[in-house]
Image: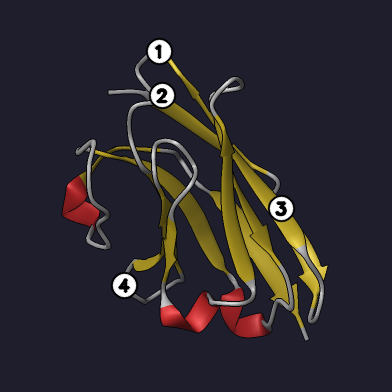
Amino acid sequence: QVHLVESGGGLVQAGGSLRLSCAASGGTFSNYAMGWFRQAPGKEREFLGVISWSGDSTHYADFVKGRFTISRDNTKNTVYLQMSSLQPEDTAFYHCARCKYTTGWYATSSAYDSWGQGTQVTVSS
């Protein structure tokens, strides 16, 4: 497993942007796909997107396509989630996670074996 720490969350007005970071340490990062999820109070965890180990392939949930972009810098052991056109319904705790597998991409939580503690994103109307 790997230790993941998210940062960059905060309060933003509707229509604004935020960039979240997820720094990895203590394990292998660059060989694995990395995903982003979110969970709002009283709701189930939602898959947002995933980036391949090399960074040359990404897949997104339909509801964030065109607004969220995932990137990574393997030299810094960091993955990013750039979010734009944020709306109040995007308010949630955002988590990064390392995929168990070195190939393919997965939208289910069970495919990920290391999770960060999360960072809160609050979008005001």
| Residue drawn where x is 27% and y is 54% of the image | 105
Q: Is residue 77 shown above or below 66?
A: above
Cα gap from disc 4 to disc 2, whole angstroms: 23 Å
Left or right, 114 with respect to 59, comes to left
| Residue drawn where x is 56% and y is 39% of the image | 72
Q: Residues within 10 Å of mark 2 (few under 14, many from 20)?
A: some
Q: Which mark is residue 3?
A: 2
Q: Nearer the viewer, mark 2 or mark 3?
A: 3
Query: In the rendered view of the protein, which quadrant contains the C terminus?
Result: bottom right
* Amino acid of disc 3: Arg
| Residue drawn where x is 51% and y is 56% of the image | 94
Residue contact at pointers 1 and 2, CB within 8 angstroms: yes
Q: Which mark is residue 26?
A: 1
Q: Earlier in the sequence, mark 1 or mark 4?
A: 1
Residue indicated by mark 4: 44
Q: Nearer the viewer, mark 4 or mark 3?
A: 3
Q: Nearer the viewer, mark 4 or mark 2?
A: 2
Cα gap from disc 1 to disc 4, whole angstroms: 29 Å
Cα gap from disc 3 to disc 1, whole angstroms: 23 Å
